[in-house]
């Protein structure tokens, strides 16, 4: 929903400001999916807005649920026919999280990531980004799912910092207390390493969680695993992270997918420890280890016992580290598995 556009259209229709107030809460808090559910509106107004500005700019094309019901994946179609995937997760009994996309496809081309195999089709606009959250709120209402969708991660399809203007606008909408009313610290944005945007992000959104998809701590290996490293090598990433810490003093999350025999060797752990120590205060740096989720690539996952050994090396160096839950593997909804044939 483009809220500014809705307000403009209501004015053009000669309606007073209170009509927008009658719409705001049902849409953003109660998760209604149709103007027909607005009991205080006349039929003529419902019809006019339905024709001009549907509540959602996205249409559901496919829904799948994991066997444990803790992950649901939706295929959503944009107005131009392009499709994206978004995921609803329940990492704990007390929390619902959605993983949303910022682009159709991705240009970074990490060889272990299914989305990277698509290439880039186009950027999403702010409305399409926030409508993924709105879609899940509607879904939870329709399915009578208890709880509130309170956390959002920009870790779906695309590189958020390659679509910085629209991502920034979407963040402002999600944090607007009169609209989605999401807490800044309940939102996370991840980048593969677009260095110039990292310090800017700290200025623009100092309270939003920031994550860097690192995956390797030597330029030779990272050039292979995260091709954007050729433009923004680790020396530039290091300086950008230092600048981020100076501006925000917020914790940085370093994402590291463990690939068997590729980046999980003792040397890789040593490189990772050295890189983290070169960035800044260890209490402000946290490594999220991710056991690789299988995609159409030649890589294999590090065994869990070996992942624990790798994690212990990190923690023995006094660096905080966790092994992230991988929900939704059985429906290809886990980290790095989102892909669509357009």
Image (cartoon, rainbow, N blue to C red):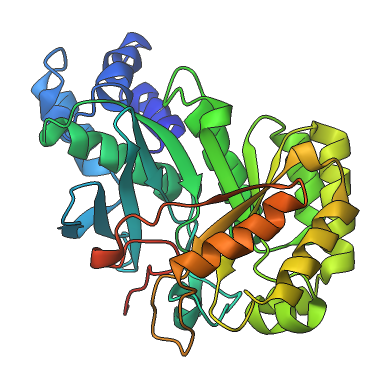
Up/down of 322 relative to 94, above or below: below
Q: Nearer the viewer, residue 163 or 51?
A: 163
Q: Is residue 103 visible?
A: yes
User: At 88% across and 37% down in the image, what residue appears?
Assistant: 246
User: At 20% across and 56% down in the image, what residue appears?
Assistant: 66
User: At 56% across and 42% down in the image, what residue appears?
Assistant: 188
Q: Nearer the viewer, residue 304 or 42?
A: 304
Q: Position of residue 118 (x, y in %)?
A: 44, 80
Up/down of 329 relative to 170, above or below: below
Q: Nearer the viewer, residue 118 or 250?
A: 250
Q: Quadrant of the N terminus?
A: top left
Q: Position of residue 174 (x, y in %)?
A: 48, 32
Q: How many numbered marks have been drawn onto this rendered protein structure? A: 0
Up/down of 280 relative to 140, above or below: below
Identity of the residue furthest to the bottom in this view:
298
Left or right side of 129 for 231:
right
Left or right side of 277 for 70:
left
Q: Is residue 158 visible?
A: no
Q: Position of residue 176 (x, y in %)?
A: 51, 24
User: At 45% across and 40% down in the image, what residue appears?
Assistant: 152
Q: Position of residue 28 (x, y in %)?
A: 33, 26
Q: Quadrant of the C terminus?
A: bottom left
Up/down of 62 relative to 119, above or below: above
């Amino acid at each position: 929903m483009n809220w500014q556009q809705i307000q403009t259209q209501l004015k053009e229709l000669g309606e007073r400001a209170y009509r927008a107030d009658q719409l705001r809460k049902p849409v953003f808090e109660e998760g209604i999916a149709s103007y027909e559910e607005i009991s205080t509106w006349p039929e003529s107004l419902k019809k006019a807005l339905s024709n001009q500005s549907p509540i959602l700019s996205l249409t559901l094309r496919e829904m799948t649920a994991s066997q444990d019901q803790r992950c649901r994946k939706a295929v959503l179609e944009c107005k131009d026919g392009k499709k994206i995937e978004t995921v609803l997760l329940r990492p704990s009994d007390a929390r619902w999280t959605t993983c949303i996309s910022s682009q159709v496809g991705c240009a970074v081309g990490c060889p272990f990531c299914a989305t990277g195999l698509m290439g880039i089709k186009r950027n999403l606009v702010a409305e399409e980004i926030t409508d993924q959250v709105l879609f899940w709120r509607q879904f939870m209402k329709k399915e009578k799912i208890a709880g509130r969708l309170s956390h959002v991660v920009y870790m779906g399809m695309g590189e958020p910092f390659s679509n910085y203007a629209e991502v920034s606008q979407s963040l402002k909408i999600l944090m607007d207390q009169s609209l989605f009313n999401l807490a800044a610290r309940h939102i996370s944005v991840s980048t593969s390493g677009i260095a110039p945007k990292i310090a800017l992000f700290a200025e623009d959104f100092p309270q939003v969680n920031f994550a860097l998809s690192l995956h390797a701590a030597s330029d030779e290996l990272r050039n292979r695993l995260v091709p954007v490293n050729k433009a923004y090598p680790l020396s530039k990433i290091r300086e950008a992270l230092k600048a981020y810490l100076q501006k925000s003093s917020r914790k940085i999350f370093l994402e590291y997918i463990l690939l068997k025999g590729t980046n999980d060797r003792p040397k890789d752990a040593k490189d990772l420890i050295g890189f983290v120590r070169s960035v800044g205060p260890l209490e402000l740096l946290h490594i999220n280890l991710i056991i690789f989720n299988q995609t159409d690539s030649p890589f294999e996952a590090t065994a869990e016992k070996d992942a624990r050994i790798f994690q212990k090396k990190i923690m023995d160096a006094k660096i905080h580290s966790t092994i992230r839950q991988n929900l939704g593997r059985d429906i290809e909804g886990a980290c790095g598995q989102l892909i669509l044939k357009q």
